[in-house]
Image (cartoon, helix red, strand yellow):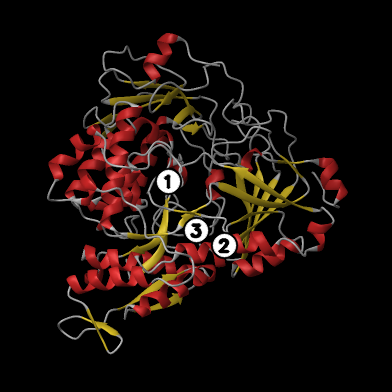
Amino acid sequence: MRLPALALLATALLPLSSQAEPVHAIAMHGAPKYGPDFKHFDYVNPDAPKGGEIRLGVTGTFDTLNSYILGGSKAAGVAATFDTLGRPSDDEAFSYYGLIAKTIDIATDRTSVAFELRPEARFHDGSPITADDVAFTFQTLRDKGLPFFRSYYGDVVKVDTDGPHKVTFRFKDGNNGELPLILMQMPILSKAYYSKVDFSKNTLEPPLGSGPYKVTQVDAGKSITLTRVADYWGKDLPVIRGQYNFGSMRFEYFRDDTVSIEAFFAGQIDWRRESSALRWATRYTDVPAIKDGRIKKEVFETEQTAGMQGFAMNLRKPLFQDRDVRRAIVQALDFEWSNKTLFHGLYTRTRSYFDNSELGATGLPSAEELKLLEPFRGQIPEEVFTTEYKPPVTDGSGNIRPQLREALALLKKAGWEAKNGKLQNAKGEEFTFEILLNNAVYERIALPFAKNLELMGIKASVRVVDPSQYEERMNRYDYDMTVDLFPQSDSPGNEQRDFFGSVAAGEPGGRNTIGIKSPAIDALIEKIIIAKSREDLITATKALDRVLQWGFYVVPHWYLGKSWIAHWDMFGWPDKPVKAGVDINTWWIDPPKAAAIGRKAN
């Protein structure tokens, strides 16, 4: 299932002298795994039975089905109603295969990409998906959509259509090798539909899509049901076969995770991904349905880059603009005590923004990394060049006196001193801030952290707000510190601009929650984006990682490297796992198992 030699040259994004020709798939580096005649991905069951309903729990609420604009609490699952130009394979680092796009044609000099659309591609109302729809979608998402679209599509200068089935995107130069793959992620909108519907407005009206599911029932803030489209135009394509097997998917909303898990044990929810080590170790024990085997616990190993989760400091606030202050605050998290006391020793401390992968920076910089870093000497921390970054380590007893001594020395250097048990600056202002959370589960992490900060003389209040208020405050960057996740793929690229780029720091609703504005970081991100080989990508990513590590922008948390899944014993799933461990779209309802626990498979 591999490409012929000539096709490999076209798809591997290799030398500019390669002869470009239309192909079925492209890879960021190297060649796509699956050839033009492949029948299905290796990690699916192509003969998986279709039908039945799966009920999934969601914490919070929703008030809009428009997932692509700023504002509103987005409903779960709506992405499955929209098809994209291409589909990724889940057992490769970064390859895309045509879905709406039948072929992909990258210009020899990399300054454009043309997509030939499948003439059979249809929206749910039966109307064809055309090049005009693709061009309209690009312009609409860029101009009216979420802020990251402007960043993702920033290097596209023009879109041309040539008849109903061909669209060409022209780039400002040929350096952004990731851009053709990014464009293949685009959910295609109906130009005709949105000529009558205001795209910029939130709505609970089910949108016109083209994907394997469509929204059939909405109970605002409480539940949403998606039903499989029986005559879905793409159901027999190799990129779809063996996936989207459930007849319907019902998302039930709960005010918090405690209620959600009780609903799961009561049989109101069928499948659950567990995120709490404490619950996984203790809650899934004395439950009748687990004891008698009706509920199963599964552990799936992952090969996916862990990314960074932690307490993110908002640099827009003067309090956090001093690196010594941020470094001092990092000392207050006692991971070893938390892991032993709260998490049953199940987690690994995060030390990199690209943990659990070859992309994470360890040891000292290589000669290749130094070539990228040297031009910024004096603009980035000197430790980047001389010292391996390691987060603080305690003895796990709860006594963090060595860390407190280091923290207080750093704070004194930054102009803060303890007076009467309170940390104050020269103006007599006290060091106080709020940790904003949207889930009460994080309180058990934040409260011990705040207690350790109090030992330094810092008053950190912990506040949990409802998801709608949290999203609204995050969009306005109205927070001091929050728990955030910066997920990473095995092939980083343009999304780094959105996470850490200077432009994104000033855009409302952006993903640069930290508010980083650094010319050096901006330049290193561009090195990642223009990397011409996997080796160059790894080098540039490690260089960026070192600068982020030594910037102390986040108090690192931990990662698992596994997926914990609990489910009622009514499912089947493929034997071969995906890199992420689990993809629920490849599961199905097993009729005999469903019958045994009193559930219908159709």
- Measured from the top left, where is residue 562 in percent x and y? 57, 47
Give the amino acid at mark 3: Lys
Quarter the N terminus occupies? top right
Other residues around mark 2 within 10 Å, as few (<14) / some (14–19) / many (≥20):
some
Q: Between marks 3 and 1, how big is the CA–CA gap? A: 29 Å
Q: Quadrant of residue 393?
A: bottom left
**Which of pointers 3 and 1 indicates the residue nearer the eye?**
1
Image height check: is 532 above or below 468? above
Asked if disc 3 and disc 1 are in contact, CB closer than 8 Å, the reply is no
Q: Is residue 476 visible?
A: no
Other residues around mark 3 within 10 Å, as few (<14) / some (14–19) / many (≥20):
many
Image height check: is 441 above or below 178? below
Which residue carries the number 2 mark? 343
Q: Which mark is residue 74?
A: 3
SS for callout 1: loop
Q: Is residue 79 left or right of residue 151?
A: right
Q: Nearer the viewer, residue 581 or 374?
A: 374
SS for callout 3: loop
Which residue carries the number 1 mark? 355
